[in-house]
Image (spheres, helix red, strand yellow):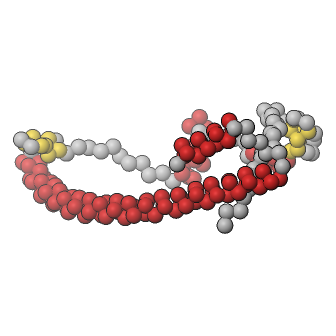
């Protein structure tokens, strides 16, 4: 369909079609309106198809979750009885770290301690005593900057003092052209 539209557009452009009066402008607007209506129709069709496909995906995902939950329950059961067995082995050999078997290993591994932070207390302490451990990220509040400044030419100036703010360049942009048509 897009190829057809592109072909139409190319044909019209190459045919030298020019809008030089209101009647031709109205024709263009009607054409845009019909094309946008076709786009809306396509989007509705695509949304309906996606919704149907999504239902099938959800069914498959539900099946997968249920099957894997059952399998995980079995895995958890076997891991718990292997843990009990490994504890018995450890009673016999308190230094036991790994017990190798043909289809795997039973292992005991030490974990690093977990650090729980009270960020407010920690920040107060570190800020007071070890400033070099503080990470500071500074940035300009651009919304507030725009409230206390004004544009003069291509410069940004503080309203109160008239001082030029360095590091900001104001670039004027061309106006934007839009075509609006009523689709309903």
- Quarter of the image for residue 166 reads top right
Q: Is residue 57 left or right of residue 76?
A: right
- Quarter of the image for residue 150 reads top right
The mark total stands at: 0
- Quarter of the image for residue 139 reads top right
Going by the picture, which residue comes out furthest to the front? 15
What x and y, as percent, mark residue 27?
74, 54
Nearer to the camera, 160 or 2:
2
Residue visible at 81% across and 36% down?
Answer: 171
Going by the picture, which residue comes out furthest to the bottom? 184
What x and y, as percent, mark residue 29?
73, 54
Depicted 16 relative to depicted 25: above or below:
above
Residue visible at 43% across and 61% down?
Answer: 49
Depicted 170 relative to depicted 20: above or below:
above
Quadrant for the C terminus in the image? bottom right
- Residue 129 seen in the current view: no
Depicted 109 relative to depicted 69: above or below:
above
- Residue 117 seen in the current view: yes
Residue visible at 13% across and 43% down?
Answer: 105
Q: Is residue 74 left or right of residue 30?
A: left
What x and y, as percent, mark residue 175?
81, 44
What x and y, as percent, mark residue 63?
26, 63
Nearer to the camera, 25 or 174:
25
Nearer to the camera, 95 or 138:
138
Residue visible at 38% across and 48% down?
Answer: 114
């Amino acid at each position: 369909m897009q190829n057809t539209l592109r072909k139409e557009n190319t044909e019209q452009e190459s045919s030298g079609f020019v809008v030089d009066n209101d009647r031709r402008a109205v024709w263009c607007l009607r054409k845009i309106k019909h094309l946008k209506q076709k786009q809306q129709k396509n989007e509705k069709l695509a949304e309906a198809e996606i919704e149907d496909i999504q239902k099938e995906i959800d069914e498959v995902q539900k099946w997968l979750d249920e099957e894997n939950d059952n399998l995980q329950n079995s895995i958890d059961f076997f891991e718990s009885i292997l843990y009990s067995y490994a504890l018995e082995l450890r009673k016999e050999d308190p230094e036991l770290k790994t017990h190798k078997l043909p289809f795997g290993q039973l292992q005991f591994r030490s974990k690093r301690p977990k650090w729980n932070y009270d960020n407010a207390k920690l920040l107060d302490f570190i800020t007071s005593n070890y400033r070099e451990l503080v990470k500071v990220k500074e940035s300009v509040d651009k919304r507030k900057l725009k409230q206390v400044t004004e544009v003069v030419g291509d410069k940004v100036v503080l309203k109160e003092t008239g001082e030029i703010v360095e590091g900001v360049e104001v670039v004027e942009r061309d106006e934007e052209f839009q075509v609006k048509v009523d689709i309903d």
